[in-house]
Structures are given as C-alpha cells and as structure tokens.
Amino acid sequence: MRFDQVKRDRQQGYSLVEMSLVLVVIGLILGAASVGKDLQRNAEYKKIKQKFVDQWVQAYNQYYDRVGIVVGDNATLPTQAVARVAVTDAGDAADLDSGAFSSVTQTNVPALCTTGNGLVTGATADLREFFDDAGIELPPGRAANTEDDYLYLDSNGNPQQASVCFRWLVPGSLVGSGNTMIISGLTPDLAKFLDNAIDGRADGLTGRFRRSTKAATAADIASTAPSQWPEGNDFNDAGAGARTVDDQVQTVVAVYKMVQ
C-alpha cells in the first residue's frame, strides 16, 4: 500500500475536536435564535405599552384637562369618580352628590367600556362616546370602533386580545381605590413587562399596576386581594380571566390606578 493511500485512510471521519466545534456552532445558532425571539417579543410588548396602554392613559388625562372632570362623571355635580353619572345609592343620590361615598357599594358603580366589550358586567355607557363628544382622538387599538381592544400574539404564536375598561373602585378595596383602568387578556410575561415599566418592579402586589384574579364584576375585583404574577406562561389558574383554548397562553387581569 502506498503512503498517500495510508494517509487518506487515516483522515476519514471527524475528530472529537471537530465534532465539538460543530456542536458549539449549533448551540450558538440556537441561542441566537432564542435571543432574537426574546428581543422581538420585548419589542412587541414595548409597542403595546406605548401604542395602547400609554395612549389610553393619555386620552383619559386629556379628557380631564379638557372637560374638567374624569370621564363619565357628573358635569353638574362632579365627584371625580369614573361613571359617576350612573352611580346611585339605594335611590339616595343626594348623599352622593354631596360627596358622601361611605355607604356606596361597589355593585352600584358601573364600568365604562365600549358597548359589547364584555370585559366586566354592569357597563351602561359606551366609553367611546365620551371621548368623541370631547373631540379627543382614541388610540388606534384593534381597528375603528374597537379602539379599546388590541390584538397581539402570545409566546405560542396564537392570537390574544387585550381589552380596557375604566371603573371607580370604592376606597378601601384590596386592589387599590379610586379611578382605575382594568386591562384583561394579558399574558403573564406581558403583564410583568408592563408592571416593571410602570412600577419599577414586577410583583403584581404593589404600586399602581396590580394583578386581580377576578374580572367578572367590579365587586369581585375590589374584594379580591392582589396576587403575584404567575411564574410563566403555562400556569394553571382557576380564577376568572384564565383560558386555554387551542394552546393559547392563559391570561391575567390587571388594574391600573389612574392619577386623576
């Protein structure tokens, strides 16, 4: 056998070093793809905050600056409570008009949502009408006439919809008090991102942005203590707002206390 033939035979196959290098390269590629997905998701979360949540807060504050009352309040006898125009206290409206809220129960306080939103019960007025009457442009949201909804994709690539309503929570309620924006349809990762951006920490328990495990009625929201955000997007929560449909990530409800 010639020398060059022996040399070729010895060069067949890959050495351990070569195989290790290949595995390292594959790992780097997979790692880069994972990082790329995280960056893309964070960019989408940032867009949701800036183009949806922040713009709804801006519209709410702009309404107060332009009209002099919070949205849905009674212009003649303002109380600075959202949807005050529809609040009654066992038929004794005079007590409320004088500012005595101590006997008001949360079930007497309706929510301001877009008609047909379905986020919480008790919505008696179309949220959009107040802003239209004041000449205030609403966030683009999902589309025209659905500005209070925002469509996005969860980490499984399935569609999710975040929705907003405004409601006055009776002082002393466990998730905070006063005028609040209720946001449903948030994946745990998105909720933690928003909490960290708004409060500087993503605990769900403190600050202006908190988690509620209830969403059906304002009474449920106000009477349920805030809780921490789930650890991941695969949590099992029996509370209202959680859902597993076609591998959609289960969602949570947040309450965001307004300044005005």
Image (cartoon, rainbow, N blue to C red):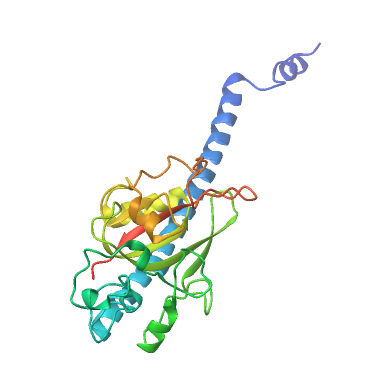
Front residue of 168/237: it is 168
Q: Up-down: is 26 above or below 250?
A: above
Q: Is residue 137 left or right of residue 66?
A: right
User: Residue 234 location in percent, x, y?
Assistant: 52, 41
Q: Is residue 257 visible?
A: yes
Which residue: 28% across, 55% down?
173
User: Residue 53 location in percent, x, y?
Assistant: 38, 66
Front residue of 166/195: it is 166
Q: Is residue 155 left or right of residue 217?
A: right
Front residue of 57/39: it is 57
Q: Is residue 151 left or right of residue 137?
A: right
Task: Check the image and name the residue furthest to the front.
Answer: 91
User: Residue 57 location in percent, x, y?
Assistant: 33, 70
Q: Is residue 79 visible?
A: no
Front residue of 39/116: it is 116
Q: Up-down: is 96 above or below 199?
A: below
Task: Check the image and name the residue furthest to the top.
Answer: 1
Task: Check the image and name the residue furthest to the right.
Answer: 1
Which image quadrant is residue 101 in? Answer: bottom left
Locate the N terminus and report the quarter of the image it occupies: top right
Which image quadrant is residue 158 in? Answer: bottom right
User: Residue 74 location in percent, x, y?
Assistant: 28, 82
Locate the C terminus and report the quarter of the image it occupies: bottom left
Q: Up-down: is 82 above or below 187?
A: below
Q: Up-down: is 173 above or below 16?
A: below
Which residue: 54% across, 31% down?
24
Which residue: 55% across, 48% down?
249
Question: How many labels sit on residues?
Answer: 0
